[in-house]
Amino acid sequence: MTAGNSLEYTPGKEQYFMSDEQKDAIVGRVMREHRENREHIGRLVAEAQKWGQKLNEISNGLMNHLEGVCPEGAGLDMNFAHHRVGFSNAEFDMTRLTALTNDYRTALKTKEHLENQLTQLGFPVPAEGYGYRR
């Protein structure tokens, strides 16, 4: 065990006896945190995909039908309405995008830390199944 608030199990670094119950509690906690982290990453990826889809839609409109790209609620001449690509400023709040990307990087660091702990505890985690590329 390490000093402080962390209950990280570090075999071979210290001579400390742990009961089976203590080990089970640590393994259970790390596995729960790992599952929660995986779910959090999945939610972040889903939100990023929504942003990407909308940006693709706008990009296509800008490249192929510039006349139809306009903000939501803005009037558009009927001659151009069949190519309408609408967007709102709220959809592209840069503060939200920055928070999303920062949260994702933090979640990846947490994932790595939890997987290292699980490996130390004898539970290596397969690399697949997260829904992100890395």
Image (spheres, grey):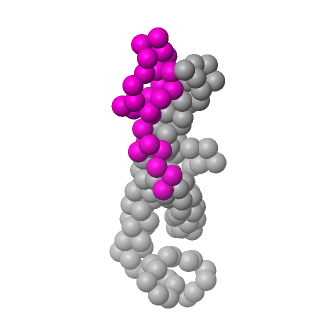
Is 72 colored magenta in this rendering? yes
Please tell me whether residue 15 belongs to the stretch shown in magenta. Answer: no
- Tell me which residue sits at (39%, 67%) in the image: 29
Q: Position of residue 71 (x, y in %)?
A: 44, 33
Placement of 70 over or under 40, stated as above or below: above
Q: Nearer the viewer, residue 38 or 126?
A: 38
The answer to whether one can see residue 100 in this image is: no
Left or right: 85 as drawn, with respect to 32 = right
Residue 89 place in picture, x, y as percent: 44, 43
Residue 9: percent from left, percent from top: 51, 76
Asked whether residue 75 is in view, the answer is yes
Q: Quadrant of residue 109?
A: bottom right
Q: Position of residue 77 (x, y in %)?
A: 43, 17
Magenta range is 68-95
Residue at 43% x, 53% y is: 40
In the rendered view, tell whether residue 73 sits above or below residue 10. above
Residue drawn at x 50%, y 88% is 3
Give the number of marks: 0
In the image, residue 35 above or below residue 9: above
- Displayed quadrant of residue 132: top right
**Which residue lies at the image location 46% right of the left edge and 53% below the top edge?**
96
**Pick the front one: 38 or 82:** 82
